[in-house]
Structure formats: C-alpha cells, structure tokens
Image (cartoon, rainbow, N blue to C red):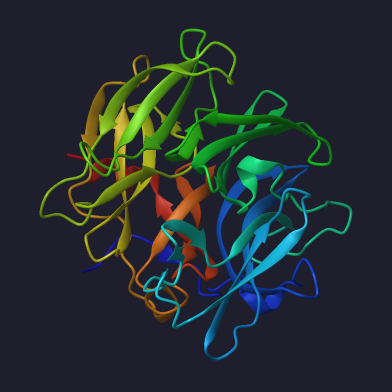
Amino acid sequence: MSDIARRFPENPLLMPKDLQSSSTELQIISLLNPGVFRFEGKIWLLVRVAESIAQKEGVIFFPVVNALGKIEIIEIPLNDPDLVANDARVIQYKGLDYLTTLSHLRLLSSDDGIHFSEPKEHSLLMGDGRLEQFGIEDARVSQLDDTYYITYTAVSTSGVGVGLRTTKDWKNFDNKQMIFPPHNKDCAIFEELINGKYYALHRPSSPQIGGNFIWLAESPDGIHWGNHQFLVGTRQGLWDSARVGAGAAPIKTEKGWLEIYHGANAEHQYCLGAFLMDLEDPSKILGRTLEPIMVPTENYELSGFFGFVVFTNGHVVDGDQLTIYYGAADEFVCGAHFSLTEILAALE
C-alpha cells in the first residue's frame, strides 16, 4: 500500500545511540513520538526517551519510580508462573501490568529541522509523584499566546491518564497534575479558543462496551474539562479497525480544523489518517480519509522495538507544507513532509 508522505532522506533522524541515558544503571531502548514546537527561532522536539536495564538470561528486569522518587529495579524469574511476558511493551505480574521501559521527556532543538542536538541548559522532564511512577510519555505541545501547554501520558499502578504542564520559557514549568483520569491518553489541545472556550481531543478507553475512540472536550480555563462528546470511532475491516487516537494539535485551515490521527488494526499495525472538523463547532466532522496518508513501508518503520508502526504527535506548518515528526517502529524519530492541499483532497 502506498502513501502520500515524502520521508526525509536523512531518516532516522534520531536513534537510541544518539543520546546518553539519564543514569548509569539504565540504557536507552527507544527514542520516539516527539511533541514539536517552535521557540526562539528554532524547531524543538520534546522526545520520549524509553529506558530499561540490561537484561540477563533467565530473568526479566524492569524499572519503576518508588514513593521516594528514586528508580527501583524489579527482578522476576522468567519461569515464574505469575509472569505473563508476551508483549515487548507491557508485562503482567500477579495480575498487575508493568511497563518494560521507564520513559521521560527530553528537549532537542534544530536550526534546519533535520539535525537535532540537546541544549545543556534545559533539564529533563521526569515523572513526578505517585500517578507518574512508571514515567511520562508521548507529549503533545500546543501554544496559546505566550504559553505552551504540554499534555502527556502519565503511567502508574493506578492506570494511564493525561497530565498537563505549562511553560513560557521551557525552563520553568507549572505542573497542573492529571486533567483526564484513567484510562485516557492521546490528548491534543487546540491552539486557539473557539467561542471563548478551550477545546481538546482525547482518547478514553473501554475494553468492555465501546472501544478506543477519539472524543472532544471543552474547558473554560484549559485545566477543567467537560461536555465530553464522542467524535471519531474505529471502522470495521479498515486499517483503523482496532483503535484510533489524536496526533498533535488540530491545524486551522480555510475548510476546517484538520487533525492527523493514528489508527491501528487487530495486528497492532499503526498508520496515519486525517479528519476535518467544523471551524465554529469542532464536534461536527466534515470529512475523513478512507485510506491512510502514511503506511509503514521503510525498514526503520517495519523493524524495531515494536515493528510496523508510524505514530505522530508533533508537527510544524509552513504554508501548504506540513512537516510531521513521528516515531517509527517505537524506536526511532523520523520526519516526513506532506501537502495540506493533498491531504484535504483525500478527505471523503
């Protein structure tokens, strides 16, 4: 299956070996799914850095953050009858789920949008408190006036929810705590108020009734959210049959709010698509792509920590050109150009 993405010839832009781990006891397993924004004339990535400990034969190790905020290593024999370890991303032990990696967020900047480096004056964004003890993941960055809103997935034994931090200078952060409780993720805040209200896309999940669908919420202040409405669901028999989730902040166009989203099938193969919302009432869907606009086709998208994945939660817009930064195979950070006109023409 072909797509309309023009991948950077320099891909992958970032690989695990390109950064140093946060501590000597951990190693970087994946760099993936960056939030993207412009600041001080540069393009910045807020990259998810997933770390773990070197594994030994016959035993599985995984890191967690304990109540004191320190990293603790859990060790379980592979032959333990209470261990279920058939997914590279999550293991189950004694009925509880644990991540095989511990993630934090790291800032990198670029003058050309291709070559990124890590400024020393910016610190790491780590999990903070009991509700983030398994780390923070997959940030989306929205700018409203001079304030940047950072939504991210907060993971703990209590579940997976959406945390929010705000900043004006990327050195001082205001932690607003969890704004959507478990089970929720993939939260993207619109970069403009609509009729005086904040709007956000989010993804509550229900394994029994319903599914992994995209919802819309509104807020008077960007912190307290309500009037939740179902927006976009999965489609049986198509590439997005198992789950859908929002990418980065919707893009304002003359035809409506354009959202790039991810979808996956029952085989956990992730592609990208698009849908269009009404400018004045984003609860109205005006169009949606039948076929994906991006499909894993390159080796670095098909093979990695978790293969056959393209996943985005960050982009920049220059006129008609949309530059998407994305996670490939849950291990690498890559880039691709799209034409907004071409995406809009693909909507049905």
Give percent across and percent down for residue 315: 53, 48
* Front in this rendered view, residue 170 or 341: 170
**Left or right for 69, reference 260:** right
Toward the right, the furthest residue is: 121
From what the image shows, is residue 199 above or below residue 183? above
Q: Nearer the viewer, residue 209 or 329?
A: 209
> Can you say whether 208 is above or below 14 in the image?
above
**Residue sitting at the far bottom:** 57
Q: Nearer the viewer, residue 222 or 74?
A: 74
Q: Position of residue 60 (x, y in %)?
A: 54, 78
Q: The N terminus lies in which quarter of the figure?
A: bottom left
From what the image shows, is residue 130 above or below residue 277? below
Residue 75 image position (x, y, % from top left): 61, 74
Residue 278 in view here: no
Q: Is residue 214 in view?
A: yes
Identity of the residue furthest to the top in this view: 195
Residue 319: x %, y % from top left:
50, 41
Q: Residue at x 60, y 54 (%)?
A: 134
On-image quarter of the C terminus: top left
Q: Nearer the viewer, residue 227 or 314?
A: 227
Q: Residue at x 59, y 36 (%)?
A: 163
Please determine whether, in this image, residue 207 is positioned above or below residue 71: above
How many marks can you see? Answer: 0
Q: Residue at x 77, y 51 (%)?
A: 69
